[in-house]
């Protein structure tokens, strides 16, 4: 990997810009060219022309380095994992969610998506980590977080580490994702580690703001930018990004519905989970994962949030 400082010096680029990039975890050319032009405009406070010039210089300097399968294996073994609220799911995942990943939960109303996200947030806060919770559906309630924490034997004070922002519009959500690029590294510098970003739900504001087939291409483009940026944040800061997703009717599918968002959302997620209601119980199913088959895990919703049956 080409070290960023030598690259900036050779290309006669501003070292002030270099310092800003290093502060958010961008340390090499490979990470630089993974950013979009819009990212650089926001992060560096430069014009689009300057951002494009920096990216083009990065593309010219890029030299791919292939790795052996054994080297990839060694890197994967070093990746930390975040425990889930469900013991059986931890077993299936080999310890939990991998840091640096995007996790999607989709399912119909009352299937347990938000309850899972609430519970995971409380668990991380109870360990001393900070959680960034973006609520686009305006359904998050403090009393529910408190109930989960107290029922699990945690001190209510831990909830102070769950940082919440309501964002009902897609434009505000996009600005928030921009802001997280620089905010999370700043928090880390002050000794505040963010381990989890939650968006409940990711697609909801885009569906509300972009209506009709004529606006579908624009919606998918902006959604793709959000997902790409969230993945960069997850990998650069070794955290997990979780988001819920809605479903749309599909008579040809086994359950009569499919996840909304199309291929853009489907291909972005590291692991996709579907959630299903079965009477008073729920099922969380691995729908798509690069290393796991489809597996069902049963759980229930209680005062503790989501827990094993």
Image (tube, rainbow, N blue to C red):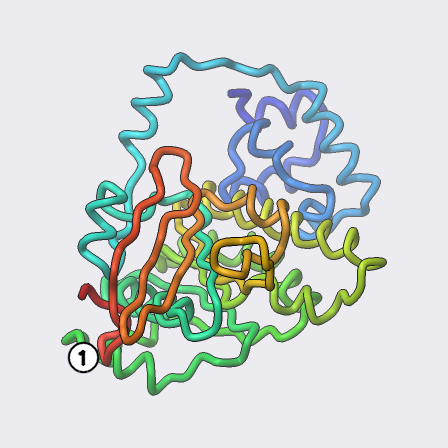
Question: 33 or 292, which lies in front?
Answer: 292
Residue that lies at the very extreme toward the left in this rendered image: 153
Q: Position of residue 303 (x, y in %)?
A: 23, 80
Question: 147 or 92, which lies in front?
Answer: 92
| Residue at figure coordinates x 36%, y 45% from the top left | 99
- Quick one: label 1, few (<14), some, or many (20+) residues within 10 Å? some
Q: Position of residue 123 (x, y in %)?
A: 26, 65
Image quarter of residue 11: top right
| Residue at figure coordinates x 57%, y 27% from the top left | 30
| Residue at figure coordinates x 34%, y 26% from the top left | 75
Number of numbered discs on residues = 1
**Badge 1 is on which residue?**
151
Q: Position of residue 276 (x, y in %)?
A: 38, 64
| Residue at figure coordinates x 62%, y 75% from the top left | 168
Residue that lies at the very extreme toward the bottom in this rendered image: 143
Q: Position of residue 195 (x, y in %)?
A: 36, 55
Image quarter of residue 257: bottom right
Image quarter of residue 122: bottom left
**Is residue 214 shown left or right of residue 128?**
right
Question: 239 or 106, which lies in front?
Answer: 106
Question: In which quadrant is the C terminus drawn?
Answer: bottom left
């Amino acid at each position: 990997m080409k070290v960023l400082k030598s690259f900036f010096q050779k290309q006669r680029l501003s070292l002030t810009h270099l310092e800003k990039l290093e502060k958010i975890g961008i340390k090499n050319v490979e990470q630089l060219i993974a950013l979009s032009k819009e990212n650089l405009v926001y992060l560096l406070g430069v014009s689009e022309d300057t951002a494009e010039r920096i990216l083009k210089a990065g593309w010219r300097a890029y030299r791919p380095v292939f790795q052996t399968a054994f080297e990839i294996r060694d890197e994967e073994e070093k990746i930390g994992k975040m425990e889930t609220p469900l013991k059986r799911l931890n077993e299936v995942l080999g310890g939990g969610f991998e840091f640096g990943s995007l996790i999607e939960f989709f399912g119909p109303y009352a299937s347990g998506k938000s309850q899972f996200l609430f519970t995971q947030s409380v668990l991380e806060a109870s360990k001393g980590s900070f959680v960034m919770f973006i609520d686009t559906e305006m359904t998050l309630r403090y009393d529910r977080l408190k109930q989960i924490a107290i029922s699990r034997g945690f001190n209510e004070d831990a909830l102070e580490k769950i940082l919440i922002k309501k964002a009902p519009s897609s434009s505000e959500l996009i600005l928030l994702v921009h802001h997280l690029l620089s905010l999370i590294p700043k928090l880390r510098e002050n000794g505040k580690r963010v381990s989890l970003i939650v968006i409940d739900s990711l697609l909801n504001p885009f569906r509300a703001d972009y209506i009709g087939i004529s606006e579908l291409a624009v919606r998918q483009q902006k959604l793709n930018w959000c997902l790409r940026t969230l993945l960069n944040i997850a990998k650069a800061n070794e955290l997990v990004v979780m988001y819920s997703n809605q479903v749309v009717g599909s008579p040809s599918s086994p359950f009569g519905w499919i996840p909304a968002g199309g291929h853009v959302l489907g291909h972005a997620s590291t692991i996709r989970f579907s959630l299903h209601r079965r009477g008073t119980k729920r099922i969380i199913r691995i729908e798509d994962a690069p290393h796991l088959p489809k597996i069902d895990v049963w759980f229930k919703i209680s005062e503790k949030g989501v827990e094993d049956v």
